[in-house]
Amino acid sequence: MKNISFAVNPGEILGLIGLNGAGKTTTIKMVSRIIKPDSGTIKVLGCDPFLRSRHYRKRVALVIGQKGQLNPDLSIIDSVKLYASIYSIDKSEALQRARMMAEELKLAEEDLQKQVRSLSLGQRMKGELILSFIHLPTIVFLDEPTLGLDFITQRAIRNYLKNYKRRYGASIILTSHYITDIEEKAWSRI
C-alpha cells in the first residue's frame, strides 16, 4: 500500500472495500495506532495517534470483527462496569447507556447478564459494540463488524451505526467484504 490519503469529516462514513490483502485492515490498524506506518503522517482529531494522548483515547473506538475485547469469563454488564472505570464514566450512567444500546441493537437484557462465552457470535458482536461505544466516541474504526453474522444481525448493526452517526455526529471508517455495509444506498435505506 503506497501513497494513501483520505480525510473524513464529522458525521461521515468512509467504507474501505477490496480484495483480501489489499490493505483495508492494515489501514484501520494504522489510523487506530496498532501498526506504525513505515513512512508518512497520520493525524486523527489533529493528533498523532501514536502519542496515545488522553484526548485521542477518549474520543476514538476500535472494533475488529472476530477479535473481541470482551472477556469470555465475564458478562457484558461486568465488562461495561470495568470500562466505565477505565473511561471515568459514572457506573450508573454507563449501565444506562449499555441498556439503551442493547435495546437499539435488539440484545435482550438477559443476554447482558450471561457469561460472554455462552453467547452467539451475533450477541457477542453486539456486546463488542456496546463496550466500544460506552464512552461515546466521535471517531469509530470498524474492521469487518458484520463478518459471519446473519442478515438480521447485520441489519441491526448497520442501523445502530447509522443512528449513532446521526445522534453524535461521529465519523466512521469501516472495512467490509459485504457490499451492503459499504454502499451509500444502504445507509439511507435502513
Image: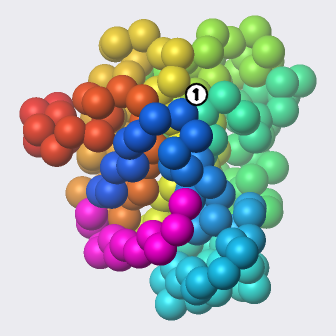
Quadrant for residue 53, please give it.
bottom right
Residue 3 visible in the picture: yes
The residue identified by callout 1 is 125
Question: Horizontal placement of 92 versus 174: left or right?
Answer: right
Which element is circle 1 on?
helix
**Could you say where residue 190 lies in the image, as x and y percent from the top left?**
17, 32
Is 104 covered by the magenta stretch?
A: no
Which one is in front, 147 or 109? 147
Identify the magenta region: 1-12
Q: From the viewer's perspective, is residue 54 above or below residue 127? A: below
Residue at the spot x=63%, y=23% of the render?
A: 124
Near mark 1 (Cα within 10 A), the count class, few <14, some 14-19 or many ≥20, is many
**Could you say where residue 60 lies in the image, as x and y percent from the top left?**
57, 66
Colour scheme in the image? Answer: rainbow
Which one is in front, 93 or 41? 41
Quadrant for residue 110, please give it.
top right
Is 11 covered by the magenta stretch?
A: yes
Residue at the spot x=27%, y=45% of the render?
A: 162
**Could you say where residue 1 lies in the image, as x and y percent from the top left?**
55, 60
Q: From the viewer's perspective, is residue 34 above or below residue 70? A: below
Q: From the viewer's perspective, is residue 73 above or below residue 47? A: above
Q: Main secondary structure of the magenta part?
A: loop
Residue at the spot x=24%, y=57% of the render?
A: 166
Residue at the spot x=63%, y=72% of the render?
A: 58
**Could you say where residue 21 lies in the image, as x and y percent from the top left?**
58, 40
Point out the residue furthest to the front here: 2
Residue 136 visible in the picture: no
